[in-house]
């Protein structure tokens, strides 16, 4: 059996070496009739168009090897190809079964229809199977003269329950509301008085994820694709472990918190639309959200959302200035703007009304280095060093609403770290060592997703960032 995808070429090779005096014929049998496609007689090559001219301009016959190539293959070229060789008083045969193979890609949640390549007759037995050759499972069929349609909800682990539709007239199989688990091999088997024909479909259901990119402190609403019904059960889940965080069941709305209490007093579930709102987003809310809608009349629906916290990366060479922008233009006299660094609770710089303040940070690494623009709220860090690498967050409160931005600053090139500077000051005071060798210090770079921070080792005067 040879499977060929639409539009491709297939070459059929004899199993014997062609001799000079051989006479050859290639025949095609599509269960209705057998037709000569090509032949070699007394070294003369002849090609034909085949039944209903379906092979016109598609055949290539190699005079030396006897190989037959069918180009621009379609489903109508499926069937049995026979090579007949007359060699003196001996006749040799080779047979090749060619099956149509179609690849179909569809987005999760959409419907897909698998269509037979040929018309079916009233007494044909139509069988649709799922899985590879070793684990094929019958999922739907039309039973010959009775024309009784059967779809098996229990087949393949029940994954197709209430989602299969078989067309009695065309034999086409439709899969509604596709899921990624529907990806795989589908086989169509048609049994008739003419014989048996087969088709193969490779279906790939691509994961559909709606992406929401937000700034820290924003709120986001995740909406279902379809209008929910009164008796629908709505389940909202979070993370790879599918932690249940909200649901509507029997008309009752419930919200939950996971073990980390990250969603406490942040969730709002709309009873009418099924929409989930997450308020005051933080880095710990970054991740995958799944909506599962269970309807007694329409079946089961899935939808996925990826919520990510927007981070702007800024990279400069040590000694240069770092400019972090709020994105504001003009003067905002009523705004409150506050800058923070890392996980520090205390502010780095802030504007309240007409008051502009900058701070040295608890370890004074920003002493005499900060400039805060009174008009725009932009923050500048002068003469940067490796110790200024890290996460910077700005919160803007105004009558127009709140706004948040997050930056991750990377300082590269030679720099003296804060720890090295403190040790140098102690050396000058104590004068206990005449020459201090290279010392290794550690700069911790806090991440936004709550995972263990990466550690960057630096030697004095260099940075590996």
Image (tube, rainbow, N blue to C red):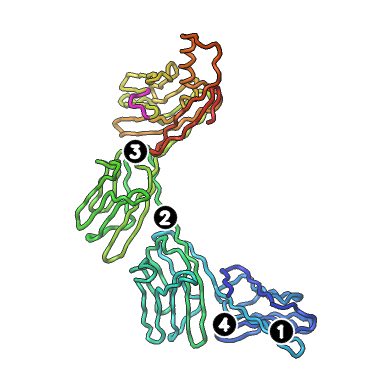
**First in residue order: circle 1 vs circle 4:** 4
Q: What is the total number of numbered labels drawn onto the structure image? A: 4
**First in residue order: circle 4 vs circle 2:** 4
Q: Where's the N terminus, which quadrant?
A: bottom right
Q: Secondary structure at mark 4?
A: loop
Return the mark for residue 85: 1
Kindly check if marks 3 and 4 are in contact, taking CB atoms under 8 A apart as contact.
no
Residues shaded magenta? 343-348
Quick check: 64 left or right of 117?
Answer: right
What residue lies at 33% left-to-right and 27% top-to-bottom? 345
Q: What secondary structure prevails in the magenta region?
A: loop
Cα–Cα gap, marks 3 and 2: 24 Å
Q: Residues within 10 Å of mark 3 (few under 14, many from 20)?
A: many
**Circle 4 residue:** 30
What residue lies at 42% left-to-right and 24% top-to-bottom? 379
Q: Residues within 10 Å of mark 1 (few under 14, many from 20)?
A: many
Q: Secondary structure at mark 3?
A: loop
Q: Secondary structure at mark 1?
A: strand
Q: Is residue 207 above or below residue 59?
A: above
Return the mark for residue 208: 2
Cα–Cα gap, marks 4 and 2: 40 Å
Labels 1, 2: front one: 1
Q: Is residue 401 above or below residue 277?
A: above
Q: Secondary structure at mark 2?
A: loop
Say if the magenta span includes residue 346. Answer: yes
Q: Is residue 103 above or below residue 65?
A: above
**First in residue order: circle 3 vs circle 1:** 1
């Amino acid at each position: 059996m040879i499977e060929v995808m639409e539009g491709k070429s297939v070459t059929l090779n004899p199993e014997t070496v062609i001799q000079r005096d051989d006479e050859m014929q290639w025949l095609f049998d599509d269960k209705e009739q057998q037709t000569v496609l090509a032949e070699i007689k007394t070294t003369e090559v002849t090609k034909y168009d085949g039944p209903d001219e379906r092979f016109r301009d598609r055949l290539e016959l190699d005079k030396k090897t006897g190989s037959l190539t069918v180009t621009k293959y379609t489903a109508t070229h499926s069937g049995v190809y026979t090579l007949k060789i007359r060699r003196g008083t001996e006749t040799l045969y080779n047979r090749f079964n060619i099956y149509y193979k179609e690849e179909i890609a569809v987005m999760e949640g959409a419907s897909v229809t698998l269509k037979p390549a040929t018309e079916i007759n009233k007494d044909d037995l139509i069988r649709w199977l799922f899985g590879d050759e070793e684990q094929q499972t019958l999922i739907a069929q039309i039973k010959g003269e009775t024309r009784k349609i059967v779809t098996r909800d229990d087949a393949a682990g029940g994954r197709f329950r209430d989602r299969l539709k078989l067309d009695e007239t065309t034999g086409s199989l439709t899969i509604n509301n596709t899921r990624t688990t529907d990806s795989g091999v589908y086989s169509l088997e048609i049994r008739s008085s003419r014989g048996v024909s087969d088709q193969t479909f490779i279906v790939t259901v691509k994961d559909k994820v709606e992406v929401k990119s937000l700034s820290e402190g924003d709120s986001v609403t995740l909406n279902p694709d379809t209008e929910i019904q009164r008796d629908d059960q709505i389940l909202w889940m979070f993370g790879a472990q599918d932690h249940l965080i909200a649901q509507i069941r029997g008309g009752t709305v419930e919200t939950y918190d996971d073990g980390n209490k990250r969603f406490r007093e942040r969730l709002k579930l709309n009873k009418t639309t099924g929409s989930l709102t997450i308020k005051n987003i933080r880095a710990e809310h970054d991740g995958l959200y799944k909506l599962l809608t269970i309807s007694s009349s329409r079946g089961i629906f899935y939808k996925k959302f990826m919520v990510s916290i927007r981070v702007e990366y800024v990279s400069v060479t040590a000694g240069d200035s770092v400019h972090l922008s709020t994105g504001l233009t003009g003067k905002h006299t009523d705004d409150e703007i506050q800058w923070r660094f890392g996980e520090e609770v205390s502010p780095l710089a802030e504007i309240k009304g007409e008051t502009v303040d900058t701070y040295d940070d608890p370890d004074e690494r920003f002493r005499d280095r900060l400039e805060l623009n009174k008009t725009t709220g932009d923050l500048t860090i002068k003469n940067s060093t490796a110790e200024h690498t890290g996460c910077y967050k700005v919160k803007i409160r105004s009558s127009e609403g709140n706004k948040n931005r997050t930056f991750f600053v990377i300082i590269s090139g030679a720099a003296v770290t804060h720890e090295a500077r403190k040790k140098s000051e102690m050396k000058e005071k104590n004068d206990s060592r005449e020459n201090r060798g290279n010392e290794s210090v550690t700069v911790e770079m806090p991440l936004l997703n709550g995972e263990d921070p990466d550690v960057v080792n630096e030697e004095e005067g260099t940075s590996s960032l």
